[in-house]
Amino acid sequence: MTRIFEGLLWVHYGQAYVESSDSNGIYLEDAFRGQNNGLCGAALPGALFLITGLHTGEAGFTVDVLDAPLPLGNIWEEIVEVSFTPGLGEIALTDWNANRVCNIPLQKKNYRVRYCACNMDVGDDVDTTLESEPTVDFYSLTFWRADPAPEVVVKQTSRKATYWHNWVRTLNG
């Protein structure tokens, strides 16, 4: 297992991204159109659009690149999985301001991505945290090599995740 990042990720409008250096920006509807999950938008090549419960502030965040998926832990309240193929150039986790948080060392091959969340509703209720305030919601983004497969909502418990999953389904109808 390789832990690429562990720390705080600044979000605004509850958003963060994984982008290839050749992407030209990620738009909410485009990233989720045709999907069933509303937390990890993977509809655009070489990009992921990540949704958090917290509107503005710092969320706890980890990024891992693995040889195979780890067993699902009970800590996570929300879990979705999507397929991802990196675009050209460097792949990076970026915050809402397009600041590079970390590079993600991926080959130009197919990956499975698991996006997990804990305390999304707490983040939603708090809405905004200031620098001196404690972190309220936490996220994990994990990549491993795998053939493309349909995206799936593995676990859903919060009203915030329910809202986003339901919203995405309106794009398809």
Image: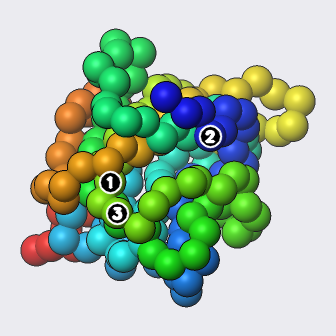
Q: Residue 133: x and y, percent? A: 81, 28
**Amino acid at dot 2:** Ile
| Foreground pick, 35 / 93 | 93
Q: Is residue 102 above or below residue 70?
A: below
The quadrant of the image that shows the C terminus is bottom left
Residue extending farthest to the top is 74
| Foreground pick, 16 / 147 | 147
Give the residue pinned by disc 3.
109
Q: Is residue 156 above or below residue 38?
A: above
Residue located 30% across and 60% down the image: 110
Residue located 72% across and 37% down the image: 8
Give the residue pinned by disc 1.
111
- 150 relative position to 22: left or right: left
Mark nearer the N terminus (1 vs 2): 2
Which tag is nearer the camera, tag 3 or tag 2? 3
- 151 relative position to 139: left or right: left
Q: How is the image coloured?
A: rainbow
Give the residue pinned by disc 2.
4
Res 130 quadrant in image: top right
Check contact, mark 3 vs mark 1: CB within 8 A.
Answer: yes
Q: Residue 44: x and y, percent? A: 36, 76
| Foreground pick, 170 / 148 | 148
